[in-house]
Image (cartoon, helix red, strand yellow):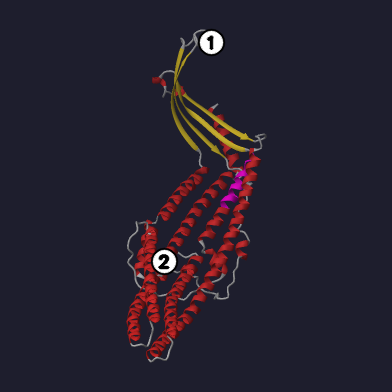
Amino acid sequence: MNKKYIVRFVVLSVFAIILQSCFVAKDYTRPQVIEEANFRSDHLPKDSTSLADVSWRALFTDASLVAYIEEGLQNNLDIRVAMQQIATANAYYRQGKAGYLPTLGLRGQVTHQELSKNSQFGSFFDGSITQYELTGNLSWEADIWGKIRSNKRASEAAYLQTVAAHQVVKTQLIAEIATVYYQLLTLDAQVHIVEKTIANRSTGLETTMALKDAGILTEVAVKQTEAQLYNAQSLRIDLQRDIALAENKLSILLGTTPKQIERGTLETQVLAPELKIGYPAGLLRNRPDVIAAEYRLVEAFEMTNVARSNFYPSLAITANGGFQSLDIDQLLSANSLFATFVGSLVQPLLNGRKIKTNYEVVQSQQEIAYLQFKQTLLDASREVSDALYAFAAAEEKIGFTTKEFEAYDLATSYSEELLDNGIANYLEVLNARENALSSEVRITTTRFAQLQAVIALYRALGGGVE
């Protein structure tokens, strides 16, 4: 009899394995939309290596900045949260991989019953019965329609999505640290300009007062020079405040309390190596947010497969066996052995529309994931185009801004010389000084915009590699 049951069990197992070839689940194919993605590329060189393949250590050559990026990647709280999300998804992924394996359980149990003495068994067992049991149970579901396979792939896609999302956070953090660092260098440069201006205007005030005493200028000129000096001193206070706020922001990005930030100078910064962009497909392939969005779509696609398989019958095989005895000292004897084998084929019929509702819901979720994926591609195209044009504009503008300052600086020297000789109007001197200060500050601002454009382009291309 036992051999007969074992043969049936083997036959059912072989039958289930054969049925696994009858998959209902579909295979994922990459949407055509990623091949069609494009952007304005007037400045796009072809057949080149993407800037995203350049290590941030090569892109940023300032030793202090490199150290801060390393510190941020180690301590930033958003990075640490992303790492925990990866660990969570990895646990589900390992669980999905084990879906093909049978489940096995062991149980030890003691059952005591007080029976009615007037019942059929109560008189026979003297009113009570105690049974000892040591059993093992094995169950396995055949993956006939690809349900387990799809669950495994969905959990794998979810895991890879969190890995890509971590790269998004990492790239964003590198960009933010670099941006704030360069902002500090720009503010330092502007403070230096303002302090030089304060010194010059203090000297100019003394000269103006001397010219007034000589009868060449009036008290109006003295007060206007004083106002210019006060304006520069007020501007220095604003810049010092902005520096403190920027230092606080960078400290938080580094995962520390606000502190003073050691740094280099704006003049010593070296721009990125020759900017090489590459073809659009290569650009978008490196974007971690695009990668994450596609894995989100893959997960939704596989969950649709799972929901579809619920319409079809499921084949499960269970086996139970162990020892049962009314006497504990006889529990492990051969006469206490028992075994049960069950093969079941279950086809859902009426279940309150739950299966169909679930299928319709996951179909909608898959469409949402596709639309979000497409939107991510559109955003990526725009960001790359914006970064390309911003960099080109900054490259072109910095030359004109430098020439503007040189012209205003020379005009200031000429107007002051003419004023000393009583030829120029003092208002011309004031205007020349203000214009020279504004243009010199704009040089630092344009330089910062140039550095920002490099960072934006690096981020837009999905940079962040070591």
Up-down relation of residue 168 to residue 402 (above or below): above
In depth, the one of 291 and 207 nearer the eye is 207
- Can residue 277 be spotted in the picture? no
Expressed as whole percent of the image width and height from the top left, the position of residue 364 reads 63, 49
Q: Which residue is mark 2?
A: 178
Task: Check the image and report above or below for 156 versus 445.
Answer: above
Residue 348, which numbered label? none
Q: Residues within 10 Å of mark 2 (few under 14, many from 20)?
A: many
Q: Camera-side residue: 273 or 424?
A: 424
- The three-letter code of the residue at mark 2 reads Ala
Task: Tell me which secondary structure the magenta stretch mostly adopts.
Answer: helix
Tell me where residue 328 appears, x and y as whole percent: 40, 20
Task: Residue 20 in the image: state x and y as whole percent.
Answer: 60, 44
Label whose residue precedes the other's in the sequence (2 or 1) = 1
- What residue appears at the point 51 percent right and 45 percent down from the top-left corner? 96
Estimate the x, y position of residue 183 in percent, counting from the top left: 41, 68
Q: Is residue 51 visible?
A: yes
Q: Which residues are magenta?
A: 298-312
Say if 129 sits above or below 380 in the image. Answer: above
Which quarter of the rendered picture does the C terminus lie within?
Answer: bottom left
Q: Residues within 10 Å of mark 1 (few under 14, many from 20)?
A: few
Magenta-span inclusion, residue 308: yes
Disc 2 is placed on an element classified as helix
Q: Nearer the viewer, residue 193 or 129?
A: 193
Question: Does the stretch in magenta take in 28?
Answer: no
Asked whether, in this view, residue 63 is left or right of residue 368, the answer is: left
Describe the element under mark 1 as helix, strand or loop: loop
Read off the residue under disc 1.
Answer: 120
Q: Nearer the viewer, residue 368 or 116?
A: 368
Give the amino acid type for the residue marked by disc 1 in the picture: Gln
Which quarter shows the N terminus?
top right
Residue 116 vs 51, above or below: the answer is above
